[in-house]
């Protein structure tokens, strides 16, 4: 327990191993990372706090979390940033044949990320990608498209807390074993 939330005190390698177990178990799982901003959002938003705290895997993304853990005597092994975990999971998916779906960012950004990842990881199976701009009336079609894709990993590039709420709302219906919010990661990968 740290402040108003929890964090798994595990390394990057241990996180990847745990995620591999989650994927193999085929049980839809929402992953989150915490940083100072999210902890502050959770302070005033009990719903967000509850849905984050229900996630079975919570990594310390921000250096502020590592610093706070140290000051509070909580033994965190290391910082596991969302973007670094994203990169490790791409390697895992490439190696193990896991299917991924890219969801979020602007159309030209997600399209570029799709192309860049296919170049960098020739064995990577990207079963779909979609931008993060849509009307509420489009949500069920998006959810069904993701579910029908057969993805093992879904990366959601929305800002917080939108991504946490959206994933939580549709986690069961999408039926993807591992769903991770990646915030602005697609923009970084695309060089934006």
Image (cartoon, rainbow, N blue to C red):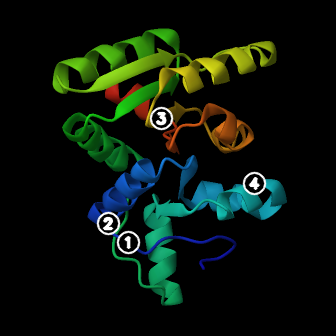
Residue assigned mark 2: 14
Distance between mark 2 and mark 3 Cα atoms: 19 Å
- As drawn, is 28 to the left or to the right of 40? left
Q: Position of residue 163 (x, y in %)?
A: 64, 38
- As drawn, is 168 to the left or to the right of 178? right
Q: Residue at x 74, y 61 (%)?
A: 49
What is the crowding at mark 2: few (fewer than 14 residues within 10 Å), some, or many (at least 20)?
few
Q: Residue at x 67, y 41 (%)?
A: 172
| Residue 157 visible in this rendered orientation of the protein | yes
Residue assigned mark 1: 10
* First reached walking from the N terminus: tag 4 or tag 2: 2
Q: Is residue 65 above or below residue 126?
A: below
Quadrant position of the C terminus in the picture: top left
Q: Is residue 156 above or below residue 84?
A: above
Residue assigned mark 3: 155
Q: Is residue 137 above or below residue 4?
A: above
Disc number for residue 48: 4
Quadrant position of the N terminus in the picture: bottom right
What is the crowding at mark 4: few (fewer than 14 residues within 10 Å), some, or many (at least 20)?
many
Distance between mark 4 and mark 3 Cα atoms: 19 Å
Distance between mark 1 and mark 4 Cα atoms: 23 Å
Q: Position of residue 150 (x, y in %)?
A: 47, 27
């Amino acid at each position: 327990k740290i402040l108003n939330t929890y964090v798994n005190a595990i390394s990057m390698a241990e996180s990847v191993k745990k995620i591999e177990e989650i994927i193999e178990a085929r049980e839809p799982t929402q992953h989150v990372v915490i940083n100072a901003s999210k902890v502050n959002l959770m302070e005033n938003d009990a719903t967000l706090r509850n849905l984050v705290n229900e996630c079975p895997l919570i990594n310390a993304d921000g250096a502020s979390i590592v610093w706070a853990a140290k000051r509070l005597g909580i033994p965190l092994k290391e910082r596991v940033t969302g973007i670094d975990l994203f990169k490790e999971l791409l390697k895992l998916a490439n190696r193990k044949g896991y299917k991924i779906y890219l969801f979020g960012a602007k159309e030209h950004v997600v399209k570029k990320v799709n192309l860049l990842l296919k170049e960098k990881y020739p064995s990577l199976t990207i079963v779909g990608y979609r931008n993060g701009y849509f009307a509420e009336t489009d949500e069920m079609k998006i959810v069904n498209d993701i579910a029908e894709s057969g993805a093992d990993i879904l990366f959601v590039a929305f800002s917080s807390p939108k991504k946490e709420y959206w994933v939580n709302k549709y986690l069961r219906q999408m039926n993807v074993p591992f769903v991770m919010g990646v915030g602005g990661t697609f923009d970084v990968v695309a060089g934006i």
